[in-house]
Image (tube, helix red, strand yellow):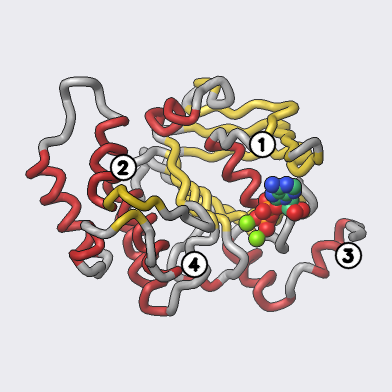
Amino acid sequence: TLQFTIEGLKATIEGKEILKGINLDIKGGEIHAIMGPNGTGKSTLASTLMGHPKYEVQDGSVTLNGEDVLDMAVDERARAGLFLAMQYPSEITGVTNSDFLRSAINARREEGSEISLIKFIRQMESKMKELEMNPEFSHRYLNEGFSGGEKKRNEILQMMLLDPKLVILDEIDSGLDIDALRIVAAGVNAMRDENRSFLIITHYQRLLDYITPDHVHVMMQGRIVKSGGPELAKRLEAEGYDWVKEELGIVD
Ligand code: ADP
Ligand code: MG
Ligand code: MG
């Protein structure tokens, strides 16, 4: 099984402290949701976990099955099984979606055990069908000219093909209409497994109608200030965040 642990994580961007001591304990098969107002550091947490160079870790630890994640380079984190579907996926001209995906898969494999082209194409086509993606997207340049919803579906396609251990989805629901949301949620639910865990960052509870989390955390001003079950997400949807601030005496 799996154990992902964040303890006392503090990180800065350009000298400004954004993460002020994050603690999270995620076990195999669990889905954790992080909700919170804009600008509280949710995307910063995701990028820091993936090792984005813009974010400087000042304190704390992150371990995956006891291994020090913060000590790993970006590509080592991916090989260890971390995956991030970004809030704003980048476009890469000159690299087709299928080339990108195949090299990402091979980068996670031992030398000499690369996936065969035929097997790769078969897998990609079957996953694209599941996500109701137009087959022509495999030949298009990565995310170039994709609509917001197409980019998000493409992130889920990457997740399905890469078979990660810890999946971080950063606002995967933004820009999705209700049909696309259902398809993306079905993709995530199909990947639920006791050897895989999810950290789902979302601004709205809507996504959590389709993907039931085990734990819901509220993040404010760089900290997780409250944790609960799915009912917490429902209350946030109904009442917003003010009651949490009042309860905890948070002033902004
Ligand atoms: P969220 O995802 O919760 O909306 P972010 O993690 O994107 O929040 O941002 C957290 C804070 O960090 C915000 O105050 C934002 O302005 C700041 N921030 C993000 N990126 C940068 C940057 N490159 N330089 C300076 N500040 C940044
Ligand atoms: Mg935001
Ligand atoms: Mg964000």
What mark, if any, has residue 246 been given in the picture?
3
Q: Which residue is mark 2?
A: 163
Residue at the spot 69% in from the left edge and 31% down from the top edge: 56
Mark 2 and mark 3 lie on one chain; the one further toward the N terminus is 2
Task: Report helix, strand or loop for mark 3.
Answer: helix
Q: Amino acid at mark 3?
A: Glu
What mark, if any, has residue 173 been given in the picture?
4
Left or right of 40 on screen, residue 185: left
**Other residues around mark 1 within 10 Å, as few (<14) / some (14–19) / many (≥20):** many
Classify 12 as above or below 216: above
Residue 238 in which image quadrant = bottom right
Q: Amino acid at mark 1?
A: Tyr
Query: Disc 1 to disc 3, how far (Cα)?
Result: 30 Å
Q: Which residue is mark 1?
A: 55
What mark, if any, has residue 250 been given in the picture?
none
**Other residues around mark 4 within 10 Å, as few (<14) / some (14–19) / many (≥20):** many
Residue 189 in which image quadrant = bottom left
**Other residues around mark 2 within 10 Å, as few (<14) / some (14–19) / many (≥20):** some
**Other residues around mark 3 within 10 Å, as few (<14) / some (14–19) / many (≥20):** few
